[in-house]
Amino acid sequence: MLRFVSQRVALGALVVVGVVALTFVIARVIPGDPAVTYAGPHATAATIAAARRELGLDKPVIVQLLDYLKGIFSGSWGTSYRTHHKVLSDLGTALPASIELVVAGIVIAVVLGLPFGLLAARFPGKSVDLLVRVVSVIGVSMPVFWLALILQRLLSGDLHWLPTAGLYNPNLYYTHPLTSYTNIPVLDALITGNFAVLGSALSHLVLPALVVAAYPAGLIARMVRASVLETLGESHVRMTRALGFAERALFTRYALRPALNPVVQVIALVFAYSLANTFLVEAVFDWPGLGSYAANSLEALDTPAVMGVTLIVAITYVVLNLAVDIVQAILDPRIRVS
């Protein structure tokens, strides 16, 4: 088991370094001068040249890459050209809002996708199966920005059930100021007992979380259905059915648990995918998270910020994959051998 985990950790570290190196090179060959962004719109040629030297942009690309990799391990992820703040500080402000949104979306996706996938597998070929498959295809294929605008218009503009955008009601900044410990409004409101902000933050969270949940919910439902049906067709399940066991017992005891193994892996991957692809949702709902930070950094050719976002997402993918591999290896020792 130790050798298995060591191999996975080494492969994960290699993947992270490769992603960082590739992103670094791509960012450097994009037309534009980051020193101009750093120095400001009215900077003189001498100021821009000084900024280029300060940022190390006058060095060869390979030297810049090596310096950046050294900085990662020493805890220095560089300074944003756009905000002039440390990238780690900016990420510490932007990342919690995205984590709040993605976690809420994944929870909704699991709550919806898992039972509907099981329902479709329980009655294959029936009308409920067809309905679940159609809705899941729509959830997977519909562009998130289009779904966001539809729900925003329907649930906020027409029905007035939910707020349109933002983290919580801005009036509460003055009437019920929130003390931030985690930069996650729902969690901070719970910690401090600020129930006015808690209620407002939860209501503001519902719409964007539903949009984020659409893709993973459809994917989970389809995966659960396919995995359970595949398990029901295996020889040990057919043998159990031939021995006279009830269909419900077959479904819950012999088919469900083995079928959930690939579903867990899908949930982990979808979490990382959602974390990296929330910028359209955040743009529609004015959500100040990682996606908005990444989009603004790309527009400004802010290489250290883009690299920081890339590194965070790559580490998330690797850590979640590693966790899933370890759990699967514990549950099924054959995976360690293979």
Image (cartoon, grey):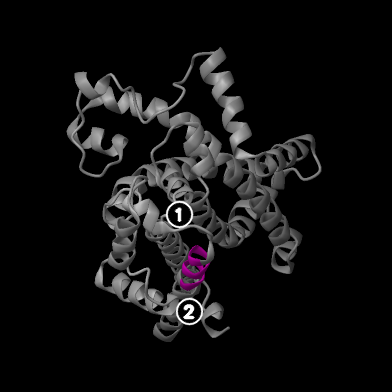
Residue at left offset 70%, top offset 50%: 247
Magenta segment boundaries in residue numbering: 21-28
Depicted 107 relative to depicted 235: above or below: above
Q: Are marks 1 and 2 in contact (CB under 8 Å)?
A: no
In the visual, does 315 lie left or right of 133? left
Q: Position of residue 249 (x, y in %)?
A: 63, 52
From this view, report whether residue 154 is shown above or below residue 180: above
- Number of other residues with Cα within 10 Å of mark 1, as a class: few under 14, some 14 to 19, many 20 or more: many
Front-most of 160 and 49? 49
Magenta-span inclusion, residue 6: no
Q: Position of residue 289 (x, y in %)?
A: 39, 43
| Residue to which mark 2 is pinned | 11
Q: How far apart are labels 1 and 2 at the CA level? A: 30 Å
Where in the figure is residue 189, as x and y percent of width and height?
25, 32
Q: Nearer the N terminus, badge 1 or badge 2?
A: 2
174 to the left or right of 137: left
What is the three-letter code of the residue carrying label 1?
Leu
Give the total of numbered labels: 2
Element at label 2? helix
* Quadrant hosting residue 239: bottom right
Residue 260 seen by the camera: yes
Task: Identify the residue under disc 1.
Answer: 301
Asked which quadrant contains residue 201, the reply is top left
Q: Amino acid at mark 2?
A: Leu
